Image (cartoon, rainbow, N blue to C red):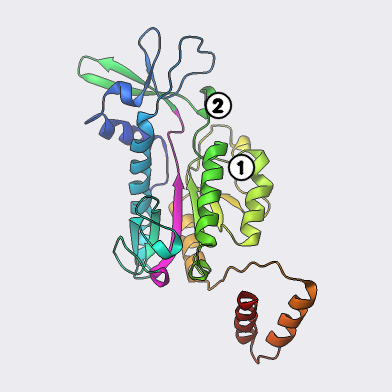
Amino acid sequence: MKTLWNKKQEENFFIKSLEFATPEQLFYQTNDNKLYAYWPKGYKGIKTTLQSRNSLIGSFTEKWTTDLFREIAKNLNGYAVQGAICNELSLTRQLPADVAICKTNKIIQKPQDILMIIEVKMSIVWNWELVKTNNGFSLVCIGNYKTHQGNPGLLRSDSMLKAIGKSINIRVSSFAASKIPIIILGNTPITKNYYNKVDHLKKSGIIQGFWSVNPHPLENEEENIKQTKQMGFYRFDNYQELKQFSLKLLTEEKEFFASMQTKRRLGEIIEIANQEQTYEGKAQRFLELLRES
């Protein structure tokens, strides 16, 4: 059984990264030479900005997500592909999909072979101190994200806005994107001012969910939101739950549509589409007419 995000995953990131990166590239150094993953709240010393860790944690979490969804993809005879490219969907070499569930195990994909797009917005959640020992270093967790300065993951407005912007860019790139679900995967809750926004994005069909795969980012479960009203945000508590949600989304045939039409034209479209004999036929004709308008 796969394990969702927890403190062990973060330990693994630091341990593996320290094999080729210096402590100063991964941790903030205080005036008294202590090394922290984040500046602790209340720290009054000189602060620097740490950028070198961003690409490292980005690569680590994208690979971790690819591994997490590999078995789910296999249930559909598909593959979890990191860095998928599809120019028709505006997924370029410069801006590929972080992870995609695809019918083929290739980097360059056709739209019809992409089953799901997953944008990964994960980072270090807890605060860690790197302590020097006689044998090298040891890692000590010194608090959750409420005890350090700066917001991780989906708690950052810039992360949310980047994820929304990229998703809209994919969604409006081509009608070929209309059948592909888009998920934003994080390892934190979201802030309250985004609750209505993520629900609206889900209801409008632009993004199918902001998902967190970190069951326990806080010790106080009352502050750890499970879901928003319309499930635009949802927190998974175990791998089986994630698998069930993912397979349901991957096997349900849905289609995104959007338009700005006069009520008269909409009435005409509905009347013409209603002449088809089946519900599926009516829906298909409605979409065709909407896109021709």
Q: Amino acid at mark 1?
A: Ile
| Cβ atoms under marks 2 and 1 closer than 8 Å | no
Look at the image and give the residue range highlighted in magenta: 111-126
Residue furthest to the front in view is: 293
In the rendered image, residue 59, in percent from the top left (x then y), is placed at 34, 43
Note whether residue 264 is visible: yes
Q: Amino acid at mark 2?
A: Lys
Cα distance in 3D space between marks 2 and 1: 15 Å
Q: How many marks?
A: 2
Q: Is residue 43 above or below residue 202?
A: above
Residue tagged by mark 1? 225
Note whether residue 235 is visible: no
Magenta span includes 121: yes
Residue at image location 66% in from the left, 39% down from the top: 192
Residue furthest to the top in view is: 32
Residue tagged by mark 2? 146
Q: Secondary structure at mark 2?
A: helix
Magenta span includes 268: no
Is residue 64 found left or right of 163 in the rendered image? left
* Mark 1 neighbour class, 10 Å CA radius: few under 14, some 14 to 19, many 20 or more: some
Is residue 217 found left or right of 19 in the rendered image? right
Of residue 164 and residue 259, the one placed in the foreground of this image is 259
In the rendered image, residue 134, in percent from the top left (x then y), is placed at 21, 14
Q: Is residue 219 above or below residue 113?
A: above
Q: Is residue 5 above or below residue 148?
A: below
In the rendered image, residue 159, in percent from the top left (x then y), is placed at 52, 40
Q: Secondary structure at mark 1?
A: loop
* Mark 2 neighbour class, 10 Å CA radius: few under 14, some 14 to 19, many 20 or more: some
